[in-house]
Amino acid sequence: MAVVATAEQIGVREGRRIRGRYQITADDLAKGLRHKEAVCRATFPIDVHALSMAGSREIDQSFKHGGLKPYDIPYPALVAADVDGLLMAGRCISGDFVAHSNYRVTGNAVAMGEAAGLAAAKSVKLGLLPHELSWDQILW
């Protein structure tokens, strides 16, 4: 085995993201989203470094000053919308620029990785694709 390629620099925070069956948004964070298929609850503060990456969209700066409410990361955000059978975890899940600056931390990634692993195992056991499962089916 050999490394084929690496990032041009370390610490890259922003890159391409895969579209999931649910996209976590800045609005979800602002409202403190509660979702029936929550895999974990995120509480880390918003950590946006390059506001120019947001494009023309204005970002509510109150997030950076403790205005964030805990919110749920839903299972459908871990399930790819365009590729059957693909599960995501950590910084790869489906979310917008602001949400990504929050959920990408290790504490959330661990819980999402465990959720994706459970979903993969249950998917194989039941002979169903991950998007065909509800979070309740995965847990039980």
Image (spheres, grey):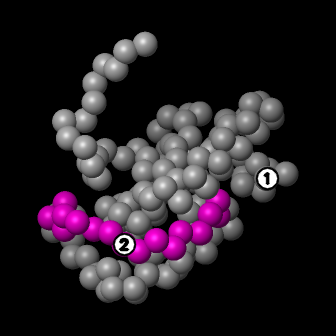
- In this rendering, position of residue 108 left or right of residue 140: left
Give the answer, above or below, for where 28 lies relative to 93.
Answer: below
Disc 1 versus disc 2: nearer the observer:
2
Q: Residue at x 28, y 24 (%)?
A: 5
Q: Which residues are magenta?
A: 38-53
Picture residue at 19% right of the left edge, 68% below the top? 51
> Which quadrant of the rendered structure holds the N terminus?
top left
Q: How packed is label 1: few (under 14 Cα within 10 Å), some, or many (20 or more)? A: few
Percent position (x, y) of residue 123?
Answer: 73, 36
Left or right relative to 21: residue 115: right
Q: Is residue 15 magenta?
A: no
For image coordinates 14% across by 64% down, the residue present is: 52
| Residue type of the residue flagged with mark 2 | Ile
In the picture as drawn, the residue positioned furthest to the right comes out as 140
Percent x, y of residue 140 = 85, 51
- Residue 139 tag number: 1
Cα separation between marks 1 and 2 = 29 Å
User: In the image, what residue occupies the spot 38% across and 60% down?
Assistant: 100
Check the image and name the residue furthest to the top. Answer: 1
Q: Position of residue 35 (x, y in %)?
A: 63, 69
Instruction: Report the number of discs.
Output: 2
Determine whether the residue tagged by mark 2 lies in a helix, strand or loop.
loop
Q: Amino acid at mark 1?
A: Leu
Is 52 colored magenta in this rendering?
Answer: yes
- Whether residue 78 is visible here, answered yes or no, is no
Residue linked to disc 2? 46
In this rendering, the answer to whether 108 lies above or below 61 is: above
**In the displayed structure image, the side of residue 14 where residue 52 appears, left or right:** left
Image position, residue 106 (x, y; %): 49, 56
Q: Secondary structure at mark 1?
A: helix
- In the picture, the disc for residue 65 is none
